[in-house]
Amino acid sequence: MSNKTAIVTGGNSGLGFATAKKLCDNGIKTYIIGRSKEKTEDACAAIGENAIPVIFDLNNLAGIPAMIESITKENPIDILVNNAGINMKKEIPDVTDEDFLSIIHTNLLSVFSVSREVVKNMKANGSGSIINISSMASQYGIPKVIAYSASKGAIESMTRAMATELAPAGIRVNCIAPGFIKTKMSAAALDNDPERKNKVLGRTPMGFLGEPSDIADAVYYFALSESKYTTGTVLPVDGGNSIGF
């Protein structure tokens, strides 16, 4: 994999950081896209060799083509990991149109825009692997995360549509749906809600929360040629939570 090049959006923390580190540790040159200059540069410094910071706000849809072109003019892109995303916890009557659109903008529109530009490069090179990150929230009826759930469900549908259209061009598109993983986002949801945390663990057959490295390992599999006959898949990485009862 030492001659490969990857892009990881939202790669300066949490699942994205673990994913970028996994790729870099295996010799893959990885462009980490992040909005915060300090956090993104610190993440690249922590990862070390092969990590390259790209300071960019993905909400700037109009700027995405030029940003991706600045990367692809240096290297063809073999792997794209669409990881960047935000959440919002509000009851439905309190969710404004602006709230809803902000989630859709970051979690869905930016994923499409980045993918579209990277696909142009991958098609020219005759191959590529795109890995989208959704959430098990797309599978459940979870209260107070209406926009987040909608955005992640759309990501999974988009994964299947992209996989079908892009397969003839040698581009595979898969999706990982993390369950409850030990990140700052999940900590905010669970640490102050013991009842919810016990409920989550109680319906998780494996009985514990996942680690960011569990997601990184799944991403790495989809990035490898060993998964060359796999496309359009949504893979739950959730300790069995989606089948527990």
Image: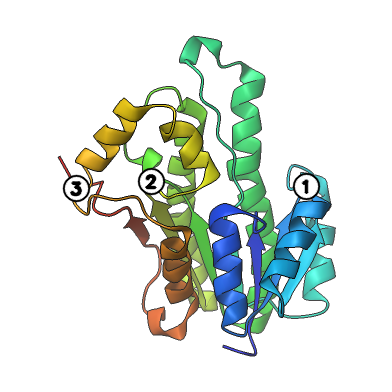
Q: Nearer the viewer, mark 3 or mark 2?
A: 2
Residue 97 appearing in the image: yes
**Residue that numbered label 1 is attached to:** 57
Which residue: 22% across, 54% down? 206
Reply above or below: 52 against 142.
below
Q: Where is residue 37 in the image (x, y as percent from the top left)?
A: 82, 53
Say what amino acid the circle numbered 2 marks: Phe
Considering depth in this image, is 80 or 39 the residue closer to the camera? 39
Q: Which of marks 2 and 1 is nearer the N terminus?
A: 1
Q: How far apart are marks 3 and 1 (CA)?
A: 36 Å
Q: Is residue 229 left or right of residue 66?
A: left
Say what amino acid the circle numbered 1 marks: Asp
Q: Position of residue 70 (x, y in %)?
A: 84, 68
Name the quarter where the C terminus is drawn: top left
Asked if marks 3 and 2 touch (Cβ < 8 Å), the reply is no
Q: Residue 13 carries which label?
A: none
Reply above or below: 11 against 28.
above
Q: Position of residue 203 (x, y in %)?
A: 20, 41
**Residue that numbered label 2 is attached to:** 180
Q: Which colour scheme is used?
A: rainbow
Task: Give the class, few, some or many, for how many residues have Cα within 10 Å of label 3's Cα (few <14, many ≥20).
Answer: few
Task: Give the class, few, some or many, for how many residues have Cα within 10 Å of label 1's Cα (few <14, many ≥20).
Answer: some
Say what amino acid the circle numbered 3 marks: Ile
Q: Which mark is residue 243?
A: 3
